Amino acid sequence: MKQANTVGELLRRRLEETSKSPEELAEAAQVPPEYIDELLDGTRRPPLPGRTDVYDKMTRFLRLARNELATCASAERAAADERPSIPDAKIRRLLFSLCDPQTAKELERRARGKQGAAELADFVQRLLDVTHGAVQRMLNDPLVLRAAATQRGSSFTAVRLRVLEFLDKTPGMLTTGDVEEFIRPRVNHWGVDFETGVLRVVLRGQEPRERERRAPARPAPEPTTDVAE
């Protein structure tokens, strides 16, 4: 059988083979039907494997090979040749407000240069990686998602979709809502050692985690998470 080139092709083929409907697949993956429709017609970029649980749920429902969907998604995203981009000025101001003023000033200065922009995209991506790790735990806790849905007067599926979409965001895709809903509640402040490229992120209410390239620990008033290149 011809190998599918996109996630949409693979899903369409398997839905036909199993006589399942897109609506049934959406229910199994715990996403709105529109999410599946957009994957099928190619208007939604397939989510990044490792940052989503929809592939596991779809794989079980459609009885696919274990890594078939994830492999297809990785190849499709690689073929798109996505280039890193920096957040727009409004989003940068929100992110830099979590830095000390001198660091914020230097980050904005670098954002205006071609080489500095690529460097900034990397810094923000690593900040996102830390935030994504904290947010991703919500997917494994339906009670937290249901509580959030009740608090917002929304549905469980809608809140779950919001989390899934944030987990797939890159720096250039960030919105004001992303920062206010996911980043600010989790990041106390962050900074960069411009000489070493080490990113220091202080998360709210999290115990310190040692990293392999971290300098010897010193007493500090707040828990820290260091992210090195």
Image: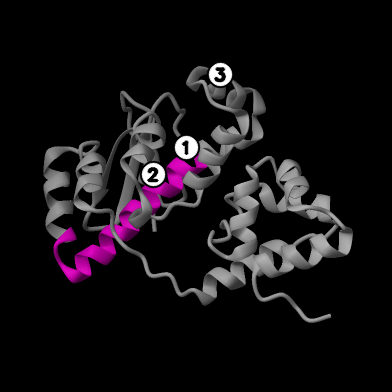
- Distance between the alpha carbons at the discs numbered 3 and 2: 34 Å
Instruction: Name the quadrant containing residue 110.
Output: bottom left
N-term mark: 2 or 1: 1
Q: Which mark is residue 226?
A: 2
Q: Which residue bears the numbered disc 3?
A: 150
Q: Position of residue 223 (x, y in %)?
A: 38, 29
Q: Position of residue 189 (x, y in %)?
A: 29, 35
Packing grade of label 2 (10 A; few <14, some 14-19, many >=20) is: many
Of the pair 113 and 220, the residue shown nearer to us: 113
Q: Going 19% across and 51% down the picture, which residue do you hit?
A: 89
Q: What is the quadrant of the C terminus in the image?
A: bottom left
Judged from the image, the secondary structure of the residue bearing numbered disc 2 is strand
Magenta: main secondary structure equals helix
Residues shaded magenta? 111-134
Q: Is 130 colored magenta in this rendering? A: yes
N-term mark: 1 or 3: 3
Packing grade of label 1 (10 A; few <14, some 14-19, many >=20) is: few
Q: Going 15% across and 67% down the picture, which residue do you hit?
A: 113
Lateral position of residue 167 relative to residue 213, left or right = right
The kind of residue tagged 2 is: Asp
Judged from the image, the secondary structure of the residue bearing numbered disc 3 is helix
Q: Which residue bears the numbered disc 1?
A: 209
Of the pair 29 and 170, the residue shown nearer to us: 29
Evaluate whether residue 89 shows in this view. yes
